[in-house]
Image (cartoon, helix red, strand yellow):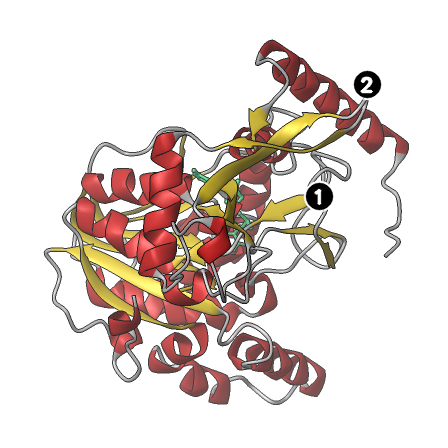
Amino acid sequence: MSLAAPSGPALADSRELVRRIGAEIDAAGGWIGFDRYMQRALYEPGIGYYTGPNRVFGAEGDFVTAPEMSSLFGRCIAAQCAQWLGEDDEIVEFGAGSGALAAQVLSALRDAGTLPRSYAIVELSATLRERQRGTIAAAGGELLARVRWVDELPERIEGVVLANEVLDAMPVRVFRRAGDKVFERGVTRLGDDALGWAERAADERLASKVLDRLREAGDECAGLPSDEAGAVPENYVSELGEQAEAWVATVGSRLVRGAMLLVDYGFPRREFYHPQRDLGTLRCHFRHRAHDDPFLWPGLQDITAHVDFTGIAQAGADAGLDVLGFASQARFLLDCGLLDACAAIPRDDLRAWTLETQAVQRLLSEAEMGELFKAIALGRGVSDDAIGFRTRDRRASL
Ligand SMILES: C[S@@+](CC[C@H](N)C(=O)[O-])C[C@H]1O[C@@H](n2cnc3c(N)ncnc32)[C@H](O)[C@@H]1O
């Protein structure tokens, strides 16, 4: 597959990032874990994918997220938030992208007369903060007045935590299981200006975690000596989303009362580590093309992995949270009133109406985002009747 090359200045930034990561690899003795590489490729100050000057979201970027497609996505999220928000509560959104979701949620809550006390955004990228400010200001000065940007995780949260497509952007460890052996896949130098895969035996902790999870997922050969490992692929490559789980546990421990609503692509563990998914879920995006080479133009392309929602639910439980619901994005949005919201779109501008209904179709379609994307809610001290999970709660599959 050929991809259009980035511009000269962008390539210079990418070369600088490769130089820096290469220096870290040398200092570490020739190898770093993939999670460390992904951290720097996405978040290196000033030249990482999310922290650099590139426009990553939207039509002229590399991918389009649900709130970029249709404002009705945020309207549905707002309906769920309204059920959970108490009088003096706040919403805390992580990784707010262009600010579209914040603007949609705040607009819908304003229209319903239920604006939260405050809307905090935890954003790692200074460039994105400015873009978010502009998007929210365009939706109304009174909305912008409620928004504050925070660098650190709040100590105490009472209200609702939102994160749309954030878990998939958190660094993952990559492993290969061969019979009873586990190898960690990491990164080494290939000459002066290129990086590539390199493996080493996994440490004991990682190896036993991987084998436990694979067995839990039904891999009957995980842990068997290679010559006895029959049906499942001998070489099974996948990821471990430890950072996403640690993040859920930390944020969950600070949630004094309220709920976390996390929307992302992924599966329950049995599906995530399905024998046929033996090449894992790591994907890269560059200008709306997906491919599987994470070392192409580091810092200029997105790198993501799907979410093991069983791991997320367990991390929440470790922090004392209840799972309030788990559903496909389509079911969640329908239960939050997407069809009513869709029916209310004025038809006087036929072109706008057509575009909006096409976007809704993409959010719901099983072939697009409706089934692959899931919503999970974790909570403390809130009732177990979340509207978004009324009809097709799949908690039992986690
Ligand atoms: C795929 S984008 C999604 C953006 C936005 N939520 C949307 O739906 O359009 C992932 C975002 O997650 C952010 N992110 C990743 N890890 C984060 C963390 N630990 N705290 C806050 N934001 C984080 C990234 O900076 C990036 O803005």
Measuring from the top left, give residue 18's x and y in whole percent.
Answer: 73, 24
At a point 77% along the width and 36% down the height, the residue shown is 297
* Residue kind at label 1, given as amino acid type: Gln
Q: In this rendering, is residue 24 above or below 169? A: above
Q: Name the secondary structure under disc 2.
A: loop
Residue linked to disc 2: 192
Q: Nearer the viewer, residue 116 or 54?
A: 54
* Residue kind at label 2, given as amino acid type: Asp
Q: Give left or right: position of 188 versus 200.
A: right
Q: Name the secondary structure under disc 1.
A: loop
The C terminus lies in quadrant:
bottom left
Task: Identify the mark at residue 301; answer none if there is no mark.
Answer: 1
Q: Give left or right: position of 367 versus 214.
A: right
2 vs 1, front mark: 2
Mark 1 vs ligand 1: CB below 8 Å: no
The N terminus lies in quadrant:
bottom right
Q: Give left or right: position of 380 versus 365.
A: left
